[in-house]
Amino acid sequence: MNPDNKKIQLSQQLEEARQLEDSINKVEVLCRLVGAYLEKGQPEPGNEILEEALRVARSLENLSDKACALARLACHYRNADQRYTFNALSSQSLEIVETFDDLFEKSWVLVKIAREYAQGGQRDKIFDSLKRAQDAAEEIPDSFRKSWAFNRIAKQYLDIGEEGTSSEILSRAFQSAREIEDESDRSWSLIRLSETYLKSGKEDRVAEILFESLAAARKIDESPDKTRRLAVISCDFTKIKQFENALAVAREIKDGAHRAMTLWVIASEYTWTGRK
């Protein structure tokens, strides 16, 4: 593209961004434009837009959104070699999170902040945020929410290539899931964990957890929840190519429409893998 046309396009995008009513979306678009100007070797307009994005971020009323936005902007200031502002915004982001009374929310926002740092290439900050998220998760009294929080943290460690740490935290998530008294919640929590184990390539572990989830699902009174649990477990067995188990679980579904749909998924996956 002609440099002049590119400049005009960026100017138009900037004006469009300024018209956005959704402040979160506005921060995202402004940050993308900062990167575009830096790629063109034009730091000055990029810095001005960065300051504008910061003003918008500071105006956010939702504290979770505000904390994440400040972390994202911190990365942009670091890339612009403004280390003082980077450190200041990183600290402000954490200060906001420390005001949260809900430990589940606190852990979740810290994971989201870690994602912002991962996208910004700030590895030290990733580990700091995830360690704080883990500390918050440890204090969550409810086993269902604790398992969910640990699972999120484990996924983020997996995304940054820390498989060993991810495995350790998944073990904590599994331990918490087993302590859930409600059969439906325990089954669902185990399903979510099996998907994370699948992502990590541990198919043998996936099967073990799915069978444990199935045992919990079978104890649920006949209901839409039970139907959904059985359908998901059945389909998840196909992901590790255990089609006989998938079929056996599907046949336990009482609702005809859900059973038919689940069998269709199994057949499609079976055909896709080339088995006959």
Image: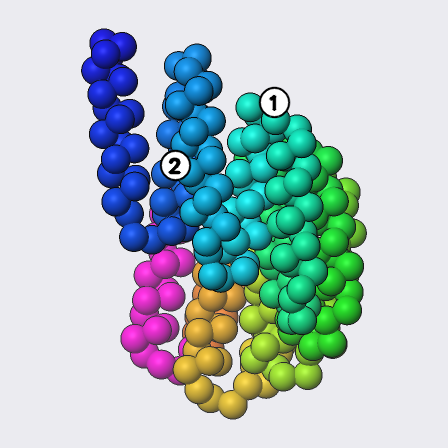
- Residue 62, how many percent across, how many down? 49, 62
Q: Nearer the viewer, residue 228 or 86?
A: 86
In the structure shown, which secondary structural element does the residue marked by tag 2 occupy? Answer: helix
Q: CA distance from mark 1 to mark 2?
A: 18 Å
- Local packing at callout 2 (Cα closer than 10 Å; few below 14, some 14-19, many 20+) is many
Specify start and end residues of the magenta stretch as a single range. 253-276
Left or right side of 272 for 89: right
Q: Which residue is mark 1?
A: 81
Q: Any mark on residue 30, and which?
A: 2
Q: Amino acid at mark 2?
A: Leu
Residue at screen point 50% across, 50% down: 58
Residue 267 among those drawn in magenta:
yes
Residue 136 among those drawn in magenta:
no
Q: Quadrant of residue 174?
A: bottom right
Q: Amino acid at mark 1?
A: Asp
Q: Main secondary structure of the magenta part?
A: helix
Q: Nearer the viewer, residue 18 or 262?
A: 18
- Residue 150, how many percent across, how many down? 69, 59
- Residue 107, how many percent across, how many down? 66, 60
Residue at screen point 23% across, 29% down: 12
- Local packing at callout 1 (Cα closer than 10 Å; few below 14, some 14-19, many 20+) is few
Left or right side of 259 for 100: right
Residue at screen point 41% across, 32% down: 49
- Residue 157 seen anywhere in this rendered image of the structure: no
Residue at screen point 44% across, 74% down: 228
- Residue 259 seen anywhere in this rendered image of the structure: yes
Q: Nearer the viewer, residue 159 or 82?
A: 82
